[in-house]
Every structure is written in structure tokens, then in C-alpha cells.
Image (spheres, rainbow, N blue to C red):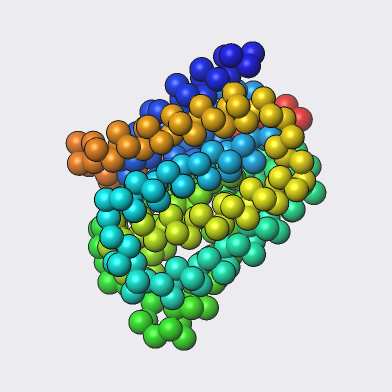
Amino acid sequence: MQVRRFRLSFLYAVPIGILGGLIGLGGAEFRLPVLAGVLSYSVRQAVPLNLAVSLVTIAASLAIRGSTLSFSLVIPLLPAVLSLICGAVITAFFGAAMAGRLSNEQLERIILVLLVLIGVVLIVEGFLPQQIPALLPPALGWRIPAGMLFGLAIGLVSSLLGVAGGEIIIPTLVFAFGADIKTAGTASLLVSLPTVLVGVVKYASRGAFTDRTALSNTVAPMGVGSVIGAVIGGMLVGVVPAAVLKVTLGVILNISAFRVFHKAKSHD
């Protein structure tokens, strides 16, 4: 079973990483159904494991971007980035604690709803233009409180799904704050790192990572496969239109979420 999990963790992570790299995301929302459905982890195990893999992929992505891109373009976005972080780390902490108090059925229902919402967001985003004027006024009096409110939602989704939150952070930065897509991708990693780190630390304090075999046989190969896939996906950007991919992946995410978590809920 452990050898099977090791192989499947890597084999599934690579294509998910490629698809995520093609649309500028980490793919964590697609890893969660794999962890729960294919690798047979309970939902309480799958979420923190997914969060640990997300931490590995964020760190690797930041290192890659730091060697190839300048972070100077993010400086104008710093007020938005810092306000997003402030909101996100608060709910990342309390979200992990809340997940521990929910029953399996409640957690599965919440995960199903959140994954479906993310799938819908991907589909809608596929039909939107890549660059639109910022929806928020440029005044900090608007942007900082709005950023904190968005951050609260991002941190909650991150801690309950074990995701980096890029599927929410990037559209927020692009459409609410007027960032270009490349800068938003880099800024998203800066928001995700402390958010995911807080979630991992909180889950660790609750004993979520005491099973060392899960770390070595699932987190490690899935983290390596995700990074390899993301690099390949980044090199293939433009081969398939991102809009087409987002719509397709949004549909696939909805189908897989219903198959895994609706089925699990109905069997409780």
C-alpha cells in the first residue's frame, strides 16, 4: 500500500503540476480529490497533507521566480499584498482549528462546496479578459480594508482545503487591484507562503503530521512531482489557450469533487 501511494503520488502530481503551471496555479485544488479518492486518505488526513505539499511547491516556485524574475514589479502592490496577508493568516489559524472541530460529514460538505465554487470561478475566469481596470479605487482607504476582507476568505479556503489559495488570490489581484497577470502570480506566492505556513504549523500542533510514512510516501513524491510538473507547465505556456484550459479544468474539478466528496458524504 505504501509503495503504491508513493508511485501514485508522483504520477498524479506531475500532470496536475503541468496543468497548474499552464494556467499559473499550483494545482492543489486538484490534488485534494486525488488524496481522498485515489490514495484513500480520510478527509482529515488529506487536507493537512495537501497543505504540506502546497508549502513545498510555494517555496520551490518562489526560488525559481526569484532567480528569473525581479520582485520590483510587486512593490506597487505591497499595500494590497500586506493587507491580504494580514487577513489570510488570521483565518488560516482559526480555519485549521475549526476543521478539527467539524465532523467528517460537515468537513466533506464544506470541501465539496468550496471545490465547486473554485471550479465555477475557473470557468467564469476563462471567459473574462486577462486585463481589466481595477475595480477598487486607488486610495489606500479602500484597498487596505478590502484586501483584509479578501484575505480572510483566502485564509479560510487555504486551511480548509489545504491549498495555497492562488485560484482566489490571482483573480483578486488582477480584477480588484488591477495587477497584470505575471505580477499577480508572483504576489500570490508572497501571500500564500505565510498563509500556508501558519496552516501547516497549526495542523502540526494538532498532531496532523505524526504519521511519518505519509510524509515520506505521499508529501515528498507529490511535492517533487508538483514542482517538476509546474516547471514543465511554465515552459509550455501558450501551447494551449489559458482560457480554454481554465474552463476545461473547472468542469473537471466540479466532476471530481462530486465523485469523491459527494460519494463520501452519502456513505456516512
Residue 199 in sight = yes
Q: Quadrant of residue 232?
A: top left
- Residue 239 is situated, as x and y percent measured from the top left of the image, at 19, 36
- Residue 166 is situated, as x and y percent measured from the top left of the image, at 44, 52
Position of residue 7 relative to residue 103, above or below, is above
Left or right: 57 in relation to 52: left
What is the quadrant of the N terminus in the image? Answer: top right
**Residue appearing at x 47%, y 24% in the figure:** 10
- Residue 33 is situated, as x and y percent measured from the top left of the image, at 55, 32
Position of residue 118 relative to residue 81, above or below, is above
What is the quadrant of the C terminus in the image? Answer: top right
Total residue callouts: 0
Nearer to us in this view, 146 or 140: 140
Q: Quadrant of residue 46?
A: top right
**Residue appearing at x 51%, y 49% in the figure:** 164
Residue 248 in sight = no
Nearer to us in this view, 120 or 157: 157
**Residue appearing at x 35%, y 82% in the figure:** 138
Nearer to us in this view, 54 or 170: 54
**Residue appearing at x 36%, y 37% in the figure:** 230
Left or right: 263 in relation to 59: right
Q: In this view, which residue lies farthest toward the front?
A: 67
